[in-house]
Amino acid sequence: MSMVAEKIRNPFHVAQRQFDIAAEALRLDQGLRLKLRVPRRALIVSVPFERDDGSWMVVQGYRVQHDVSRGPAKGGIRYHPQVTLDEVKALAMWMTWKCAVVNLPYGGAKGGIEVDPKALSLHELEKMTRRYTNEIAIIIGPEKDIPAPDVYTDAQVMAWIMDTFTMRQGFASPGVVTGKPLSIGGSLGRREATARGCTYTIEEACKHMGKPLAGMTVAIQGYGNAGSIAHDLLHERGAKVVAVSDSRGGAHSTHGLDPKEVQAHKKDSGSVVGTPGTDRIGNRELLELKVDILVPAALENQITEDNAPRIKPRILAEAANGPTTPEADLILHENGVFLIPDILANAGGVTVSYFEWVQDLANYFWTEDEVNQKLETVMRRSFRDVMAIAEKHRVNNRTAAYMLGIGRVAEATRVRGIYG
């Protein structure tokens, strides 16, 4: 890969280029551009812990806060062997715009540990999580920075973080994280929120295009929380999911895949590959299938200038963060692909995280129907807000979403001014 291509694929450089495009369209003041294109704070920590065999392991952890002009920082924590500081910086920046697009009173943050969690026992994961929490505790808290689950982290990891933080504080602090188990202040509807929010935006895109969702063919790359639940929800609405994949590969059937069968096979075997009645398909191959709706729900930089010319769904709904590079955006737009950008499509997760935080602070909890109803209101309104900017300024949907989010953050920054 050339040095130029290497730079383009760096997630933080991608995030900055997306910011620059929208800042130019907004004619943003130069001082605001300088402030908003870099993170406010980046913490790098060593995380030592004892393994089950008595040996020690030390891994690198990060917590980045991009912006807090609209409220406390908010963002997930991922455990992955390829986590880098630049990836976490990019994800924190995307969180800032995402929270602003759906008009939540949050700034953006992200965390990560450079580790393969599959190589650790549950006991080792707990020890590592608690040590990492202790190291980042100086900058997190219900009023400062609220972590959440992300790649290879879950409600149990959030429970360990909450407990560790609580022990340091000396009193219960459920609002320090979201995505917790219900028994300690989690919210109903949180597990399904990312996929549900994405589904609402897909329904809105279908309405916008004058096409019914029922009968449309779908491919989903990534079969974790977002991808598998999106399969359920789209199947319920009459769409035909013909291909799904996870890190080991994919399963394809022109007859459509029943989500219960795929999920049962993945639970038994650890992968969707080999689901009875399906053909094996690669992750890259799945992206290029001739389908109506493509849902990338895996990692960043999956759709690049190299494969974008062959990716031609009617609707591309980014359930993952940063799956498409700026060069690929131009190609997709020219080919008439209707993009629902990540900072809109997957904002359901952070929206219900916000609802969870509000419930924790008030010690008053809502029914699942109330949560879903409020989520639907936010997602459909935000979709219309983005479309209005796209049509008014004649820009693509990604730039429109960025203009909406960046515009709101820039206004808050301008009004507050610079302290000191």
Image (spheres, helix red, strand yellow):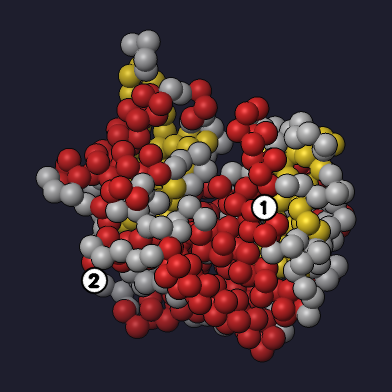
In front: 369, or 219? 369
Residue 317 horizontal/vertical position (percent): 68, 62
In front: 20, or 112? 112
Residue 95 horizontal/vertical position (percent): 48, 61
In this rendering, is residue 128 above or below 236? Answer: above
Instruction: Work out which quarter of the rendered image holds the N terminus and state it.
Output: top right
Instruction: Work out which quarter of the rendered image holds the C terminus and state it.
Output: bottom left
Q: Label 2 belongs to which residue?
A: 420
Q: Which mark is residue 231?
A: 1
In this rendering, is residue 321 above or below 119? Answer: below
Instruction: State the image quarter where residue 295 is shown.
Output: bottom right
Callout 2, which amino acid? Gly
In this rendering, is residue 202 above or below 322? Answer: below
The structure residue drawn at horizontal position 35% and vertical position 83%, both measured from the top left corner, is 415
Residue 301 horizontal/vertical position (percent): 67, 49
Instruction: State the image quarter where residue 280 is shown.
Output: top right
The structure residue drawn at horizontal position 42% and vertical position 33%, both measured from the top left corner, is 60
**Residue 7, visible in the rendered structure:** no
Locate residue 19 relative to residue 231 in the image: left or right: left
The local secondary structure at tag 1 comes to: helix
The structure residue drawn at horizontal position 81% and vertical position 50%, both measured from the top left corner, is 256
Instruction: State the image quarter where residue 328 is shown.
Output: bottom right
